[in-house]
Amino acid sequence: MGNLSAHFDKSEFRCQCGCGGENPSKQLIERLEKLFKLMDAKSIIVTSGYRCPNYSVSVGGFKNDAHTCNIAADIIVNKKGGGAYTAEDIAEAAERIGFGGIGLMNGACHVDNRDCETYVNNHWFGDERNGNDNIKSFQRGTVFEGEKTSDKPVEKKKPMKVTLEYDDHKYSGLLEEL
């Protein structure tokens, strides 16, 4: 066993072919920890971490993809209250964290550090389910459980009395912020 951080062990990133390859980048682990905190996760399951070139090709990847460079993980994020976040939720949070490579998958999400590591291209947001490799952003305005909100109560503004004059008529009433 080799603890990499509070929530991740080296064995989770081991190549599934049995070759023994494993060595996720420090930045990948740091970003996964930030994702864990932002989403207030119960757990993050790594379904695929490092892949040797032959194994990567055998599962539909490439000999030189982000998994073979130790900068990628396919993940499922479990909620503390039960169930798992959707791939879209994970992608939105991963974009906020700063992952440069994000791909929607069936039941999981691909994340990688291509933006900060030596890699063939420094940005990719896509949907591996349908081949759409041109997603501009995953942002939808979701507020995740781990996001800090202000401790101060929201101050409701008092209504303001307004008067409007139009065609020699005066209209008045209260204007309230919704």
Image (spheres, grey):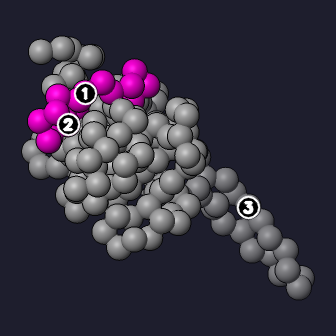
Please give the name of the residue rendered at 22% of the width and 56% of the height, measured from the top-left corner: 58
Q: In x, y percent, where is residue 175?
A: 64, 60
Q: Which region of the structure is painted magenta? A: 12-28
The three-letter amino acid code for the residue at tag 3 is: Val
Q: Nearer the viewer, mark 1 or mark 3?
A: 1
Q: In x, y percent, where is residue 11?
A: 16, 25
Question: Which circle's residue, 2 or 3, is located before the other in the chain?
Answer: 2
Please determine whether, in this image, residue 173 is positioned above or below residue 34.
Answer: below
Q: Which residue is mark 2?
A: 15
Q: Nearer the viewer, residue 142 or 86?
A: 86
Q: Nearer the viewer, residue 170 or 105?
A: 105
Q: Nearer the viewer, residue 101 or 31?
A: 101
Q: Could you say which disc has been placed on residue 162 in the image?
A: 3
Please give the name of the residue rendered at 39% of the width and 25% of the height, measured from the top-left corner: 25
Please give the name of the residue rendered at 46% of the width and 30% of the height, measured from the top-left corner: 150
| Element type where label 1 sits in the image | loop
Q: Nearer the viewer, mark 2 or mark 3?
A: 2
